[in-house]
Amino acid sequence: MNTPIVTEAPRVASAPAATDAIERIACEWCYAQNQKTALSCRACGAPLDIRNLVSESGWREAPRIRDMTEIHFGMSTCQVEGEIVPVAELNLGQGDAVFFEHHVLLWKDDHTPMSVMPLQGGVKRALAGMPFIISVAHGPGRIAFSRDATGELVVLPLHPGMELDVREHAFLLASHHINYSYLRIKGLRNILFGGQGMFMDRFVTSDQPGLLLLHGYGNVFERVLRPGESIMIEPGAFLYKDSAVTMNVESQKLTTGFFGGTGMNLARMTGPGRVGIQSMYVHHATD
């Protein structure tokens, strides 16, 4: 009588384990795989119990990360705190590091090591209004970041072999596996009057993944453009794009009847790739 019980017990115990290995929840924002019991994505913090919100024209909202959501990267964690002016609090593991514009640091443990990233073209960066000092925080230790403006934190896990262009002064932090440089967009002289500079930050991954956090004013939306598909956006609304997306500025004349016309500078974004915009933007004289 005992034999059936002994033989059945291992089968009953192993069935849920096999099911757990198969049943995963794919994040709709970054496509990372998560345990079926998870409420938020380990890689980007997006809520897993809320479906993507997509407009009829194809713009999807960046996920609104819940207060105190924890994100994992490398040997480290990032906890998103607050909602109006969100804070990214990092617990850096041994061997991990993040780089950032030094004025976005909110606080750090006194023993968290710091250094400065060497950059080329410092004079050109300074004249362009871009940061010419990029700080680096090394693990182990705790450190927190925020920008002094309302908006959203956009968490973008970058897979190996990805290139992303970001509006200047928009990135909050990036993990040390990401290569950082800046890009001069030729032919954008007229866009200065629209509030967008001629330089963008470029983030590139090689054979290892990385984590990039951006700050967007207001709400952030993303749209994936097909090859050859174009959209026109107000330059001040631009937040990020895949490097494969081309960006050109076109001046459109608006007729006003008897008094002639006026012009409007718009950025033409042409796919393939992602384009991110922010709903609230401020035109700075130095941008």
Image (tube, rainbow, N blue to C red):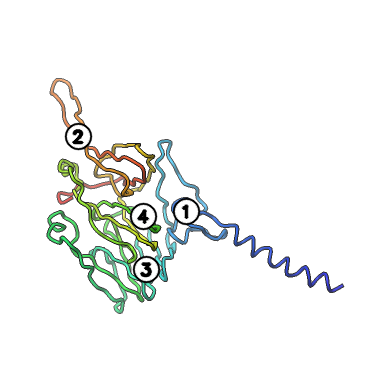
The Cα atoms of the two marked residues, 2 and 3, are separated by 43 Å
C-beta proximity under 8 Å, tags 2 and 4: no
Image vertical order of residue 51 relative to residue 37, above or below: above
Image location of residue 106, percent across then percent down: 28, 67
The type of residue carrying mark 3 is Leu
Q: Nearer the viewer, mark 4 or mark 3?
A: 4
| 33 sits to left or right of 237 | right
Q: Earlier in the sequence, mark 2 or mark 4?
A: 4
User: Mark 4 and 1 residues: CB-CB less than 8 Å, in contact?
Assistant: no
Whether label 4 touches label 3, CB < 8 Å: no
- Which circle, 2 or 3, is nearer the viewer? 2
* Residue found at x 13% / y 23%: 259
Q: Residue at x 35, y 73 (%)?
A: 142
- Tell me which label, 2 or 3, sits earlier in the chain: 3
Graded by Cα atoms within 10 Å as few (under 14), some (14 to 19) or many (20 or more), the crowding at tag 4 reads some
- What residue does disc 3 label? 90
How far across and down, in percent of the image, does residue 245 sit? Answer: 31, 44
Question: In the picture, which quadrant includes the N terminus?
Answer: bottom right
Q: In front: 92, or 226?
A: 226
**Distance from the alpha carbon under mark 2 to that under mark 1:** 37 Å
Query: Which residue lies under the disc numbered 2?
Result: 251
Instruction: Give residue 157's quadrant in the image.
Output: bottom left
Q: Amino acid at mark 4?
A: Met
For the residue marked with disc 2, what is the amino acid? Ser
In the image, residue 188 above or below residue 139? above
Of all residues, the one furthest to the right in this rendering is 1
Q: Which residue is mark 4?
A: 162
Residue at mark 2 to residue at mark 4: CA–CA distance: 31 Å
Question: Which quarter of the picture shows residue 211?
Answer: bottom left
